[in-house]
Image (cartoon, rainbow, N blue to C red):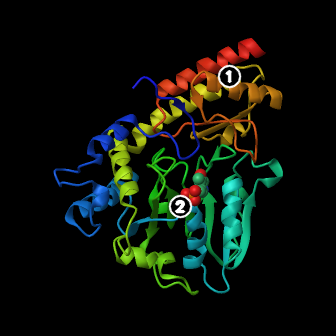
Amino acid sequence: MSNRAYNFNAGPAALPLEVLQQAQEQFVEFENSGMSLMEMSHRGAIYERVHNETEQLVRELMGVPDGYKVLLVQGGASTQFAMVPMNLLKPDQAAAYVATGSWATKAIKEAKLFGEVAIAASSEADAYKRIPSLDELNVPGNAAYVHLTSNETIEGTQWAEYPDTGDVPLVADMSSDILCRPVDVSRFGLIYAGAQKNLGPSGVTIVVVREDLVGAPSMTVPTMFRYDTHAKSGSLYNTPPSFAIYMANRVLNWVKAQGGAAGVERLNREKANLIYSTIDASGGFYKGFANADSRSIMNVTFRLGSEELEKKFVKDSEAAGFVGLKGHRDVGGLRASIYNAVPLSSVKALVDFMGEFARTNG
Ligand SMILES: *Cc1c(COP(=O)(O)O)cnc(C)c1O
């Protein structure tokens, strides 16, 4: 397809073209069933196979060890901001959070609705340009868990190495970097991610949770917001978002064909390095927002000398076929989101454009 945009949207974001084409082929009639997958009962054998295979693919590609549940739920990562404290926090405990940026701040705000929140570390004083170092972490003795945001989508920072929190379960929001690189799941108590950045369209949220953390919550929690509801029913307590799960299934199969998490990581680093080296070699024309040691390989944030020039960059880039390069309104500037499905060819086109823009506007 020749008219596909160079799509750098932050989320929902680019999907693999092969997946979109396969979905198109399978849309009206699924596997000689006489109907679309979206017209089928979620209790039927065909949907159930897609559902269970999706869970298995998450297990396989993330290397989820025994003793963990993989849940497919709704409500986005924003609902997990509430579900985590509702299910994990007990009376007299504190919920410890690492304040790294916009999404961590939203998670903290929500946790405060349910109990005491302790800030284990914060980079607010540095405008969230960096991820706190591991030795900055200060976890209170009564912490129920430590929550971190693996990749700050808006600021463009990412944990290079995760902290060891000992017996205190580590909880991670991986919405914008799940499966962008191999992760040792055994170090986490709970991982969650909305699908619409790296796993598919919006509508489904993946939760990987250690079984000992799935149990009766201490506080009153509505049925749909309890992890054990979804764990006991194989994520089929109520009608699941079947189309979103089908699409995630196809994206996961695509990741597998790229060589799994390690395969996509190689490509992700190549893509990120191309843009960061263009920024660093521009003689100050482009200025990276995040500190070098905290740079994200998923969201590259950068600025130009003036807001006027940034506006021109957005306008000229749109005229050249690029979409989604305007930074989030909270931090301004520019952002290129280069999730797994963004092809290397789009990134090469972007660095060519950046070079040309610097030459003509520098
Ligand atoms: C996008 C995003 C969210 C919010 O996800 P929703 O599915 O829209 O609720 C939360 N955390 C991070 C890190 C994100 O990138």
Q: Is mark 2 within 8 Å of ligand 1?
A: yes
Which residue is depicted at the point 37% across and 69% down?
A: 239
Residue 245 shown left or right of residue 194 in the figure: left
Closer to the camera, 18 or 355? 18
Disc 1 within 8 angstroms of ligand 1 (CB): no
What residue is disc 2 on? 76
Asked if marks 2 and 1 touch (Cβ < 8 Å), the reply is no
Q: What kind of element bears circle 2?
A: helix
Tell me residue 360's x, y (percent). Answer: 73, 12
Residue 178 in sight in this render: yes
Q: Position of residue 329 (x, y in %)?
A: 74, 45
Determine the quadrant in which ligand 1 lies: bottom right
In what element is the residue under mark 1? Answer: helix
Spatial CA distance of label 2 from label 1 is 33 Å
The tag on residue 78 is none
Q: Residue at x 45, y 47 (%)?
A: 182
Q: Report the quarter where the N terminus lies.
A: top left
> Where 141 sits versus 240, above or below?
below
Q: Which quadrant of the rendered structure holds the C terminus? A: top right
Q: According to the image, label 1 marks what residue?
A: 316
